[in-house]
Amino acid sequence: MMKKNDKVTNIFLSGVGGQGTILASNILTEVFLNAGYDVKKSEVHGMAQRGGDVTTHFRFGKKVYSPLIKYGDVDFLLSFELLESLRYINWVKADGKILINKQEVFPPAVNLGLAKYPQGVEEVFKKYFKENVNVINGQEIAGKLGNVQAANVVLIGAFSKFFPEIKEAAWINAIKGLMKEKLHELNIKAFNEGRKAL
Amino acid sequence: MKKEIKVLQGNSAIARGAWEAGVKFASAYPGTPSSEILQEIADNYPDIYAEWSPNEKVAVEVASGASIAGARVMASMKHVGLNVASDPFMTLAYTGIKGGMVIVVADDPNVHSSQNEQDSRNWARFAKVPMLEPGDAQECKDFTKIAFDISEEFDTPVLLRGETRVSHSDSPVVLEDRKESKIPIGLDPKNATKYVMVPAYVRVRRKFIEERMRKLEAYADGFKFNKMEINDPSIGIIASGVSYLYAKEVFPEYSFLKLGMIWPLPKKMIAEFYKKVKRVIIVEELDPFFETEIKAMGYKVFHGKDLIPNMYELSPEIIEQALKGKKYKAPKIKIKPEDLPRRPPNLCAGCSHRALFYALKKLGTFVFGDIGCYTLTAAPPLQALHTCICMGAGIGGAHGAMKVFGKEGLGKMCAVLGDSTFLHSGVAPLMDVVYNKGNSTTIILDNRITGMTGHQEHAGTGFTVRQESTNMVDYEVLVKALGVKSIKKVDPYKLEETTKIIKEELAKDEPSVIITVNSPCIMLKRANRKFKNPFFVINEDNCRGCKMCLEIGCPAISWREGAGATKDGHKRKGTVFIDKGVCVGCDICTQICKYEAIVPGKR
Ligand code: SF4
Ligand code: SF4
């Protein structure tokens, strides 16, 4: 039977296809598995290869049953795009922590001029979650390192600060294990810049 | 030795289970959420022969042959794939197997990416074969292995039910070694009564099936993955797979009967559970499968489908809400998600399908469609595809409709399908068009790969699942052999020419086929697609804001509001903008703009 101290931590990742959310969630998986936790991860992505919304439910704890997080039970929201963070705002617990990448990717209806891209996303989050809201510009930071593609790892770097109990090396090892060697240097830099950004 | 633990996706764990079980032969046709199983086998387990079959029926047929030869075999597919394979499958239930045979069928509750939502448990009851259902990756591996043992022990194909949340979830798995099966390789020509299903022999096997079912029922009662957990005796939940995990998450203090084998049901165990708990709740996704069966056994079900929905997928909060009723505390709504713009998947920037469907739309053609990326063209702004029923149905549909309209239908309709879909089940209906003196037009969109499910090879790509080069089907020769005389090739990136050819073919009073060329999937690395200009930009002096170019729905083009005027004084409400990071330079939009406002950009 589950006891009170067997708490499971719920992390919800959201973004747009092609942004690298899957890789980000794979890093989380490696890190928390190696830290001795039970982990469960579940992904949903749209039908085509690209462009649809992508979400990942990631859970760790002593024993994890459901691969899905309960609606309203998210402890940490890690979002790679502004609109895709707003879409899941109701999922976050009252005291949940939030990290958002300041990037706008227009969905088709907005491109066609049929819908408006939501404004003031940051403010909406701050209204409900106050100082628990963190926004960083992953593309800009990664761009300075020479490759905007590394924005997802910048975000992971910042996100790692929420888990002081996990050593920095554990994150770096996971990144190394999941990427080709020629990408190690760039992504370790991206990770470190991300850590500084928060 | 330290146990090696690895986080695996459910599908990868099934592949691992197959390898550990000594499987020698695996076949499949890709379909979400089952596609990764075969690819994983091909990539990581060289001990297993692996192939993409043209469709699921063929996948099961070739697997049956390998089984009769003594190998352990696995065929995998999505739920609608088993419908295609149902013909050999239903009879294989009679013949049984030699080498263990497991058919993985992955359901898609909530229809994330399918044309219907069906509960494959019904196939197990229908075919009278056992079915197992894992709930996480460890169980995916364990159940796959035990499914092979059951198959050989009871001389039956075994169904392994996957579903989106199991197939596409990752969790830790303990890895073990491979063990070869004890069944000898070799054919047994004296066994015609078992493998030749003519009526006299069928009747013998018919009886065998009933006996097998009774033995399997007894087995289910002792099956180690059917587990009873008695906690709070006042209430007990019967569930399987991921539904069990959701229920356990919400009600950890309740008692549980967790079914690993979901057909046949363990009757004695159910009786025992009813003795041990006061009230029984059945939590199952989709159909009231357990509920119907358990009620038919004469038991009272305290709650089941009266509260738990019988459509879409379950989740912990749906179960909590259903069973707690008013006591359930919904989270506070801060934003209504329905007020936000949706983000449906879209054809990629530069995709050749976009141009072809734009041409069809301009011609006002009714399109009998099919299953693939191009099905997305049914959505705005293109709205150029009008039916999608199952693979191959578009060709038959267009033929049928043309027969209704006669010559009046000429020029008004056509069938469209992809290369992989054509090989899956387009050949037979096209043969029918010719044979029955039809006059419909079929357009084969050859993007050189199975696009939608994530780039699987097929008989038309020239490569096997393991990337060895092989023969490449020549669609033109094949179509000619079926008797089609009018065969045209079009380059969809040349809009005017494409439109002209389609118009001519649609008007012909004979069967006709159009095959696209120069149209590989834009994401296919091997094709190394390069256009003349790296990207295009908007010349704001010329853009009148007429929005014509928005009609193709290219993700690189967006609308920017703002009153203004062109250089030569035409008033406008806004202009469009091309994101050069997204644009690949396919040149389709420039052929639509009448005002020369879209011009090549420079790196
Ligand atoms: S050229 Fe036009 S249609 Fe083609 S990708 Fe670029 S913006 Fe889209
Ligand atoms: S680019 Fe051409 S087609 Fe598009 S809005 Fe401007 S003028 Fe119209």
Image (tube, rainbow, N blue to C red):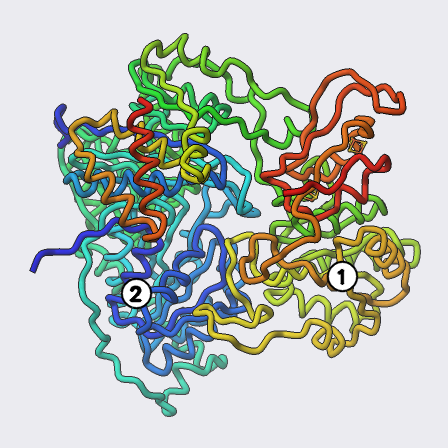
Return the residue nearer the eye: B305 or A171. A171
Ligand 2 located in image quadrant: top right
Asked whether the viewer can see residue B88, the reply is no
Q: Looking at the figure, which quarter contains the N terminus of chain B?
A: bottom left
Q: Is mark 2 within 8 Å of ligand 1?
A: no
Asked whether the viewer can see residue B27, the reply is yes
Label 2 resides on the chain identified as: B
Residue B204: image location, x then y, percent:
39, 78
Left or right, B424 with respect to B71, comes to right
Residue A87: image location, x then y, percent:
48, 24
Residue located at (46% from left, 75% from top): B62
Q: Could you say whether the residue bearing mark 2 is in a helix, strand or loop?
A: helix
Q: Residues within 10 Å of mark 2 (few under 14, many from 20)?
A: many
Return the residue nearer the eye: A11 or B320. A11
Left or right, B169 with respect to B107, comes to left
Residue located at (45% from left, 31% from top): A139
Which residue matches tag 1? B442
Which residue matches tag 2? B18
Return the residue nearer the eye: A187 or B187. A187
